[in-house]
Image (cartoon, rainbow, N blue to C red):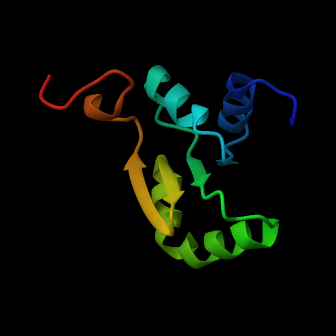
Amino acid sequence: MHAAKDEEILARALKEDRIVVSADSDFATLLALQEASSPSLISFEAPTLLLAQNYVEILLSAFATLDPELISGCVAAFRKHRLRVHKLPFQPEFAVGGRAGN
């Protein structure tokens, strides 16, 4: 699915009950716009990771913590050696263009 559009990848992941793993932040935006509760997304924003093995090591070290969150629907974002998890569907303050308190 390398050449597939982001929407197609999300639709297939939803249909096949899969998790999307990507370095493309567009997937989180699409999930927010769709107000989707699944599929879960694991997002990497770590330009220093050069080898697939680096990604695997990070995932394996966090998997026990992430497993229940991924099952219930979330976006897990790895950024600069930190992990942030946001439950799906996104709350209004996380949605594109949304602001807390509105």
The image shows residue 25, relative to residue 19, as above or below, that is: above
Q: Residue 34: percent from the left, percent from the top?
A: 49, 21
| Residue at 50 percent of width and 59 percent of height | 79
| Residue at 70 percent of width and 65 percent of height | 49
Q: Residue 22: percent from the left, percent from the top?
A: 68, 47
Occupied quadrant, residue 92: top left
Quadrant that contains the C terminus = top left
The residue lying furthest to the left in this view is: 101
Closer to the camera in the image, 21 or 72: 21
The image shows residue 84, relative to residue 20, as above or below, that is: below
Q: Residue 82: percent from the left, percent from the top?
A: 45, 66
Q: Please give the count of numbered marks on the rendered protein.
A: 0
Closer to the camera in the image, 94 or 40: 94
Occupied quadrant, residue 50: bottom right
The image shows residue 8, relative to residue 22, as above or below, that is: above
Residue 13 is left or right of residue 99, and the answer is right
Occupied quadrant, residue 59: bottom right
Q: Residue 32: percent from the left, percent from the top?
A: 45, 28
Quadrant that contains the N terminus = top right
Residue 4 is left or right of residue 95, and the answer is right
The residue lying furthest to the front in this view is: 48
The image shows residue 59, relative to residue 26, as above or below, that is: below
Residue 60 is left or right of residue 70, and the answer is right
| Residue at 51 percent of width and 69 percent of height | 81
| Residue at 80 percent of width and 65 percent of height | 52
Closer to the camera in the image, 84 or 87: 84
